[in-house]
Image (spheres, rainbow, N blue to C red):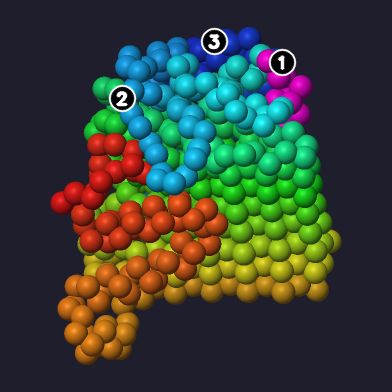
Amino acid sequence: MDIQKTYEKYINVFEEFKDKLKNNESEKLSNYRKKAFEIFQKLGIPDNKNENYRNAGIADILNKDYEFTIDSRGAVVNLNEFFKCEVENLDTHVVLLSNGEYYKDNEPITDLNEGVIICGLQEAKAKYPEIIEKYYNQYPSEIEDGFVALNTMFAQDGVFIYVPDNIEVNKTIQLVNLTHGFGNKNIFKRNLFVLGKNSKLSLVICDHTLNMSNNFVVDITESYVGENSQLDYHTIQNEPNKSGVINSHFINLEKYSRCNSFVISLHGGILRNNVFAKLAGENSEANLYGLNLTDKDQRVDNFTLIDHVVPNCMSNELYKGILDEHAQGSFLGRILVRKNAQKTEAYQTNNNLCLTPQTKMRTRPQLEIYADDVKCSHGATVGQLGQDALMYLRQRGIDAREAKLMLMFAFANDVLLKVNIPPLRERIANLLDSRLRGEFSFCDHCLLNCKSRS
């Protein structure tokens, strides 16, 4: 199915099921769907004529026919028994999503801090309408993007987390996105995370597929970080070669707040990761980190937009990629410094290793500055392993393969060192080492619990 036919299919499905999609939601939320439908009709599906999606490989995702489900189907097995996702020495609250729906049999979380809410987004719409209506779609509605509109049209469920003022959540929340079952699935999921003032939340998001079908997942996560609060957000992607994922994270930062965002792409077919960060309050800070490893015909496309709206804010950005065989990658990073955002500090770096002549890496760092008292820089590199460094290691008795592995790990380790949860950092490092050695490509259990295999 080509892009035009897919576009027409989405239009027809929405027209047919728009009343069912409301599902008793408020008029305000329903109007968001209507507005998104109008935007989607105008913009269509982004293709290679769209500057932001030129190298994303969207046509290769949409050349298949996907099963589209409006009604909830639930899981036919007990996922708590069938699937385990653990990180050694890391105590977490685990939350499962089943094909984009909050898993109804999630094990209850009984030791949360007072006032913290974790539930499905659909449930939250009914139980906490004031919070939902205050935050839902506030930042995404500012961005005209065909896939953002598409998600807003169709997404019904996801995870809702609310952290009230003056609360540091006592454990890391581990959100496991499971795609499973038969058939090629088209999944839309929406997460909403809200942190009040002086609060802290740490999240680990594990994307994992339990089937080998062609799946197309369109996700949006909204994070609203209140005054003097901190969000540590880690996305770890492990998808089969047939997967297509459009993943967008919107981060709104109030004064003196901070977000540390990680996107670790260890395996996948075609992955597109969007990160939008708006520094809306003075002295806020956004740190965006990314690492992707690709081989065969895999493709990872990273897009970032950091919007410095007010003065005295800081952003740091470090994305790295290692490409092998016929893999492709792209990075488009944009830093926008608005006229009133004086005393801004913004730094962006994108480094890539291409291990074969057949790989393709495209990188475009961008600075758009309208203030005159700022410190900003950007840089990008695409290259191969340094022959001098290889020779240095070989001369000290290290064989060629091990020397290359050491250099690749050292290259990637700059990103891993930014992870401030030691057990998680160690687990990702072990997985990175296994991935570089070719000891696993796609495992049958969660990425964070997999064993090395040849």
Q: Give residue 215's position: percent from left, percent from top.
A: 33, 32
Residue 44 visible at all? no
Does the segment drawn in magenta span residue 129? yes
Q: Give residue 413's position: percent from left, percent from top.
A: 42, 67
Which of labels 2 and 1 is toward the front?
2
Which of labels 2 and 3 is toward the front?
2
**Left or right: 196 in relation to 52:** right
Disc 3 packing (10 Å; few <14; some 14–19; many ≥20): few
Q: Secondary structure at mark 2?
A: helix
Does the segment drawn in magenta span residue 454? no
Q: Which residue is mark 2?
A: 82
Disc 1 packing (10 Å; few <14; some 14–19; many ≥20): few
Q: Which mark is residue 27?
A: 1
Query: Which quadrant holds residue 127?
Result: top right
Q: Which mark is residue 20?
A: 3
Q: Secondary structure at mark 3?
A: helix
Q: Secondary structure at mark 1?
A: helix
Taking depth in this image into account, of 309 and 314 the one nearest to the observer is 314
Q: Where does the magenta region start and end?
A: 127-138
- Callout 2 amino acid: Phe
Q: Give residue 434's position: percent from left, percent from top.
A: 27, 57
Do the CB atoms of the residues marked 2 and 3 lie less than 8 Å apart?
no
Q: Residue at x 28, y 56 (%)?
A: 435
Q: Residue at x 41, y 44 (%)?
A: 87
Q: Residue at x 58, y 72 (%)?
A: 378
Q: Of the two numbered discs 3 and 1 on the same chain, state the one appearing first in sequence.
A: 3
- Callout 1 amino acid: Glu
Task: Determine whether 244 is above or below 19 in the image.
Answer: below
Task: Determine whether 285 is above or below 353 in the image.
Answer: above
Q: How many marks?
A: 3
Disc 2 packing (10 Å; few <14; some 14–19; many ≥20): few
Specify the quadrant that holds the N terminus: top left
